[in-house]
Image (tube, rainbow, N blue to C red):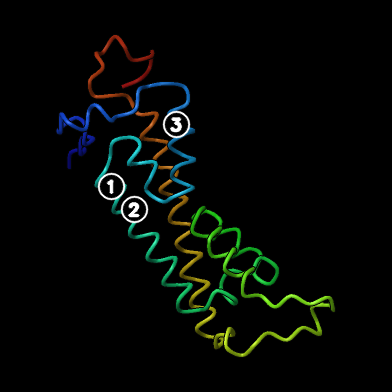
Amino acid sequence: MGLVPPEHATNPAAAAYAPRNSLFTGPIAGFLAWLVPGLGHIYLGHRVRGIICLVTITLTFWTGVAIGGVQGTVDPRERTLWFMAQLCTGGNTLAAYGLHQAVEPHANESSATVQRPAAVLAQWLSSDVGVHYTGVAGLLNLLIILDALGRADAPSPNRRRHDHPPGAP
């Protein structure tokens, strides 16, 4: 099975938008991949791969939020470890957490006496399924971030053999 060349290698129009090799290409691609899933690949010139990652991760995350409700799904106080997994989706988690804060009841009393409205509470099973969907989306996006970082550091197919550092294939 052969490797699929980047889109700018097969599409001359995409070559103009391919990032230049620099010290910051990897970190920028990694940050963009965290902020919006797939955006790091799009930045590197892998448009189709980036769009597939964007649609897959975003739909998985927001399907989880729709199943479990924003109150029970994205909650850093009650589900700390799952929230850390969800944070790997970047902007999606930040938006969902903003919604969580907007619908959370605010009171000056302790949290033990605050009762959440029944309309925002999900059934226990749907809440757990939603948490698992969003957590898995975050962990999958972590793999996508690592893939974008690896592709940013990969040698360009356009470079000649003597341009590679010693020991590189």
Compared across the picture, whether 132 is left or right of 52 comes to right
Q: How far is the residue under mark 3 from the one under mark 2? A: 18 Å
Q: Residue at x 53, y 72 (%)?
A: 131
Q: Residues within 10 Å of mark 1 (few under 14, many from 20)?
A: some
Which image quadrant: the C terminus? Answer: top left
Residue 64, percent from left and from top: 46, 72
Q: Which mark is residue 53?
A: 2
Residue 79's place in the image compared with 12, above or below, is: below
Report the amino acid beneath label 2: Cys
Identify the element where label 1 is drawn.
helix
Identify the residue under disc 1. 49
Cβ–Cβ below 8 Å for labels 3 and 2?
no
Q: Residue at x 84, y 79 (%)?
A: 109
Residue 99: quadrant of the picture: bottom right
Identify the residue under disc 3. 26
Q: How many marks?
A: 3
Q: Residue at x 77, y 83 (%)?
A: 114
Report the amino acid beneath label 3: Gly
Q: Earlier in the sequence, mark 3 or mark 1?
A: 3
Which image quadrant: the N terminus? Answer: top left
Q: How far is the residue under mark 3 from the one under mark 1? A: 17 Å
Residue 57, percent from left and from top: 39, 59
Cβ–Cβ below 8 Å for labels 2 and 1?
yes
